[in-house]
Amino acid sequence: MERNKTIRITALLAGLLCIFTTSAQDKQNTIQPLPKEVEIRLALSALPPHLRDSATVYVLDPAKGFEIARKGSNGFHTFVARNGDDAMRGDWPLIEYRNDILYPISFDEAGAKTIMPVFFDIAKMQAKGTPPAELKKTIQDRFKKKYYKAPQRAGISYMLSPILRTYTNPDANDNVITASVPHVMYYAPNITNDEVGGSKPAPGAKYPFVILPGPHGYSIQFLGQAETEAVRKEYKSLLEQLCTINKEWCLPATEDRSAATHQHH
C-alpha cells in the first residue's frame, strides 16, 4: 500500500513538472502577434509607395509561422520580422526568443527565393517549439552546408519603414536598439566591406557599406535626413500605435541618427 502511494506521488510530481515545463516553453516560444491591420501597414511601409499596392504581404501566426495576407503581382514580398536572420549570426548564445524584435523587410523575386526562406524557416521552427539554441545551430549549420543559397542575380531589399528594433551588431553580440533608419539594401553576396571600400557602418553614413558578409550579405544606403523625416511624418499615427503596444517600440524623443552604432537592418 505504501508502495502504491509512493507511485501516485511520483506520478503527480512528474505530471506537474511536465505542465510547468510546457508552460515555460510556451511562454518562451510565443510571440505576441500584432493587430493584423497594424502588421500589414507596417509591412507595407518597408516598400516605396509605387510598389505597395501590388506587393505580396505576409502576417505572422505565432502558432504556425508566416502566412499570406494578400497575394501580390509585382514580384515584391514584404513582412515584419519578429525573430529574423540576424539572431542567427555570431557565436553568442540565443537563450530566449525576444518578443520586442521588430523590423519590416521586403524582397524582390531574387531575394524572396533565396533569403526570405531563412526568415520563414525560423518562424516555423519557433512556432513548433524548437528551443532557441537548437534553432540557431540548425540555421548556422544550414549555411555551412550551403542549404541556403546566394541570390542568383543583383537585386534589392527595401527597408524604408519609420522604425525597427533589432540587433546592433549581431556578428559580435546580442545588443539591440530601437531606431528610425529607413534604408535600401542591395544584395552583395560574399563581399566584405573592406573589398568595396565601404564607410564605417553607422546610421546616417554618407556612403554605402556592407553588412552580414556571406551569401546573404547586403550593401546598405541610408535615406537622407529630409527623406527620413518625411517617412516619420507619413507614419506618425502608426508609430504612436506601436509605442502603445510595446514601450520598447517607442522611438527616442529626439532621434539622433549619428548617436547609435547600428550595423544591421
Image: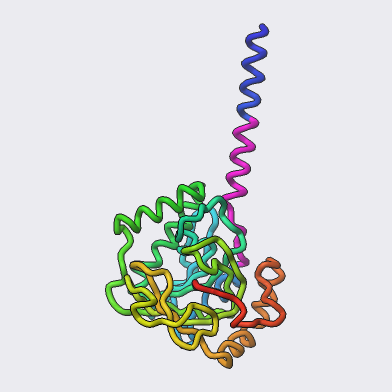
Residue lying furthest bottom in this view? 226
Whether residue 176 is visible to the viewer of this picture, yes or no, is: yes
In the rendered image, residue 223, in percent from the top left (x then y), is placed at 51, 87
- Can you say whether 19 is above or below 30 in the image? above
Q: Nearer the viewer, residue 63 or 130?
A: 130
- Can you say whether 14 is above or below 76 in the image? above
In the rendered image, residue 184, in percent from the top left (x then y), is placed at 45, 82
In the rendered image, residue 11, in percent from the top left (x then y), is placed at 61, 22
Q: Nearer the viewer, residue 36 or 2?
A: 2
- The residue shown at (35%, 67%) is 214
- The residue shown at (59%, 58%) is 98
Horizontally, residue 203 falls left or right of residue 74, namely right
Say which quarter of the image contains residue 211.
bottom left
Residue lying furthest top in this view? 1
Q: Quadrant of the N terminus?
A: top right
- The residue shown at (69%, 77%) is 252
Magenta includes 17?
yes
Q: Nearer the viewer, residue 250 or 52?
A: 250
Horizontally, residue 195 falls left or right of residue 136, namely left
In the rendered image, residue 193, in percent from the top left (x then y), is placed at 39, 76
User: Which of the colour schemes (rainbow, by chain, secondary structure, one colour) is used?
Assistant: rainbow
Say which quarter of the image contains residue 4.
top right
Magenta part mainly helix, strand or loop?
helix
Residue lying furthest left in this view? 152
Q: Which residues are magenta?
A: 16-35
Q: Nearer the viewer, residue 122 or 56?
A: 122
- The residue shown at (53%, 82%) is 182
